[in-house]
Amino acid sequence: MCLIAFSWMPGSDMPLLLLANRDEFYARPTAPAEWWAEAPGVWAGRDLQAGGTWMGVTQTGRFAALTNFRDGRALRLAASSRGHLVADFLAGDVPTDVYMRGVSANGGAYNGFNLVAGSIYGTAAEPAQLWYCGNQPGGQARALAPGLYGLSNAVLDTPWPKLTRLKARLAGVSTGNDDLIDASMAFLSDPTPAEDDALPATGVPLERERMLSPIFIVTPEYGTRAQTVLRADGSGRIDATERSYESAAAAKALLPDTLRRMRFRVQRPGEAPR
């Protein structure tokens, strides 16, 4: 389960500004974001159990992020790993529209998901573009117009309370603020639960809906494992900060076990990495 809010304004001084929490069981082995040795140019965390990832960016400006779709039904154990949808996009060079239409056509191979992917600045092979697709009703593959978007464990922009709150906070962010990272992390660390009458009905018990309703989740066995703020400016520079938590105690105290900061300028076709 995850939560993402992002501003997509291609061609502006800040084409992409994204705030995201990844929620997972503490027992599931995870590696924090780093440059991947087997896929040069990919910066992402790693799900060590299935081998994929939930979010990442590349030196050429490709970006992808994933959330699961929550519907209360049992997961199909034989389904393909959803994290490979992100990993395969980041490590490949298939144009975004082609990739996302292919994912949409083969969506039945996976448990419920939502995927956002694209090229932040564009390349010789494709324009700057972000696409969304999912494998549930309302998740048809489509390019995203400039705007403010949110994604949790339902289709794009479903107005769950925590998503509405995070989008409102992102809308009020000043991109020129020197405290942007700290302010954004504070937004992502809000443990306030939703009122019962505002909870979605996704097929899980009421107590679990309550537990999953805050922006920042902390329970003994399950919670927010990673927090990411990613910004891509108009000059081609990308800056990403990730906090990761390995236990409920660390998360409750907001003392990350790992803090990663990555900055680079996007590598244009034919350029050497910088």
Image (spheres, rainbow, N blue to C red):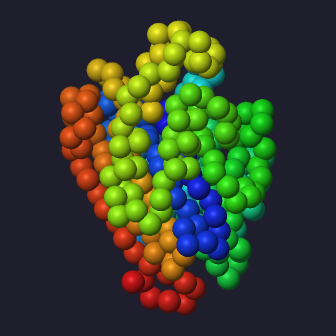
Task: Answer above or below: position of 266 versus 254.
Answer: below
Task: Answer above or below: position of 238 versus 194.
Answer: below
| Camera sees residue 86 | no
| Number of marks present in the image shown | 0
Residue 41 percent location from the top left of the image: 44, 71
Q: Residue at x 59, y 60 (%)?
A: 89
Q: Quadrant of the C terminus?
A: bottom left
| Camera sees residue 263 | yes
Residue 5 percent location from the top left of the image: 55, 46
Task: Answer above or below: position of 54 versus 61.
Answer: above
Residue 188 percent location from the top left of the image: 41, 41
* Residue 193 horizontal side relative to residue 33, left or right: right
Task: Answer above or below: position of 213 versus 148.
Answer: above
* Residue 171 horizontal side relative to residue 254, left or right: right
Residue 200 percent location from the top left of the image: 61, 20
Front-lying residue, 249 or 184: 184
Q: Residue at x 46, y 75 (%)?
A: 237
Q: Residue at x 63, y 16 (%)?
A: 201
Front-lying residue, 17 or 202: 17
